Amino acid sequence: MKLKVCGMQYSENIKELVQLEPDYLGFIFYDKSKRNYVGEIPALPNKIKKTGVFVNETKEEVLRKLVKYDLQAIQLHGEESVDYCKELKETFQKQTEIIKVFSVGTSFDFEVLKKYDTVCDFYLFDTKGKEKGGNGITFNWGILKENKSQKPYFLSGGIGLDEVDKLKNFLQQDYAKNCVAIDVNSRFEIEPGLKNIEELKTFQQEIIKNEI
């Protein structure tokens, strides 16, 4: 099971978090977000994938940021179309992972995923809320029983230490077999963009390093 920590903001905090060796670190490039990242990104070990998070951004700006920050993954958190994802994928030539986000409420039409199966590498299921991520609330993971896609996915949305037991139970279910990563953000924050390293370390020990 992989770990993605999203919404990084402060250089020293990033350097501390690197010691935990998460698989992905997410940097939000969306000016309406309180975690919008500006400035340079500290050097990261090669094993940590620098992930740029975008919301309905132009392809040109995504590519500009990809080159500027040497991103290894792109997370699309808006209403990006199939054609949009296809064009990016063809441009990347498999060098950059594409993670397409879908916001899940009390219901979700999983038929929508079929169109995206060939144009992205992973799905990410987040909680539908007021903000484009970072809402701090979970959705009913049981709804993923209805997901017939075999595409590997990230589980996100309000996951914190209080969800450890619930998460362990979820990961034991047959319908969770394609869950390959856990994405965390606001529930591990001291303030927006500033992560609690000790709590993340505890979570990592409980979920990531003690695989079900």
Image (tube, helix red, strand yellow):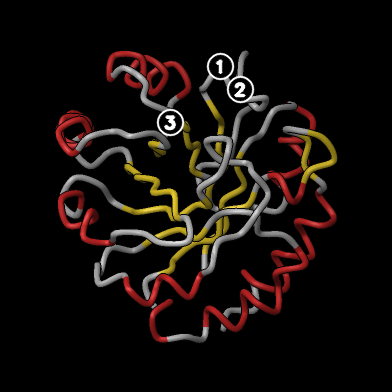
Q: Earlier in the sequence, mark 1 or mark 2?
A: 1
Identify the residue under disc 2: 36
Q: Which mark is residue 71?
A: 3
Alpha-carbon span between mark 2 and mark 3: 16 Å
Identify the residue under disc 1: 31
Q: Residues within 10 Å of mark 2 (few under 14, many from 20)?
A: some
For image coordinates 62% across by 13% down, the residue present is 39
Measured as percent of width and height from the top left, residue 60 is found at 29, 14
Q: Are marks 1 and 2 in contact (CB under 8 Å)?
A: yes
Q: Earlier in the sequence, mark 3 or mark 1?
A: 1
Measured as percent of width and height from the top left, residue 210 is found at 65, 79
The front one of 93 and 124 is 124
* Figure quadrant of the C terminus: bottom right
Measured as percent of width and height from the top left, residue 142 is found at 48, 75
The front one of 199 and 127 is 127
**SS at badge 2:** loop
Alpha-carbon span between mark 3 and mark 1: 18 Å
- Eye-nearest disc, 3 or 1: 1
For image coordinates 57% across by 35% down, the residue present is 131
Q: Residues within 10 Å of mark 1 (few under 14, many from 20)?
A: few
Q: Is residue 175 above or below residue 106?
A: below
